[in-house]
Image (spheres, grey):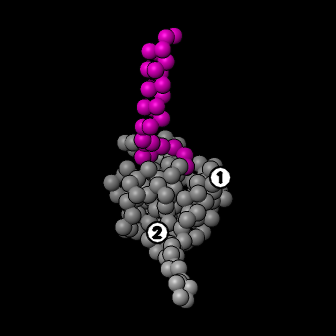
Amino acid sequence: MGPHRTREGIILALAIAASPVAAQQAGWQYSPLPGEGDRATLGCDRDATPQSYTCLAVRCEDDFSVGIHVHTSRPDKLGAWQMTLDRENASFTAEASEAPYGGRFVERAEWLLERIRQGTFIYLRHENDQYGSFAYIGLDGSLYAINQALAFCAPRVPQAEPIAEPGV
């Protein structure tokens, strides 16, 4: 293996490492959507592809509250979603949101957030997909990813002007 092959290997490795992360991939990671990486985490179903995906996003909202959103490739994102969270059935309604994810779960959001943080799995599907399969989202790694994304979810305190000493 000569120096030219080593150089080509290094260039290839750097190109692969520098390529962007797919917007939808299985598991929990920072949200790759523009402007969302430092304020949201995205957990996608185990069969997610860029063409077909169902994800949950936990996001620091503009008012510094925590929001839970559904991000999916299906055309109708709003409305009722059926979920099974660690063998506990629930239904949540996704409402319109300014965020780039589609719909936001507002009612019982704190309960849902706790289940996402501490649970094992979620099965979910839109109410209109009665005969479709549920999307499975594993929650291993969700607590860490959520804590990382929300670590700075607090109002920024403006820098105080230094107080000049008298006579200076």
Disc tally is 2
Q: State whether residue 81 appears in this view.
A: no
Q: Position of residue 13 (x, y in %)?
A: 48, 28
Mark 2 belongs to which amino acid? Answer: Glu
Residue 8 lies in magenta, yes or no?
yes
**Residue at image mark 2:** 61
Residue 60 lies in magenta, yes or no?
no
Could you tell me which secondary element the residue under label 1 belongs to?
A: loop
Q: Quadrant of residue 110?
A: bottom right
**Residue at image mark 1:** 120
Question: At 36% across and 67% down in the image, what residue appears?
Answer: 98
Question: At 55% across and 49% down in the image, what residue appears?
Answer: 28
Q: Nearer the viewer, residue 149 or 159?
A: 159
Magenta stretch, residue numbers: 1-28
Q: Quadrant of residue 119?
A: bottom right
Q: Nearer the viewer, residue 63 or 122?
A: 63
Residue extending furthest toward the bottom:
166
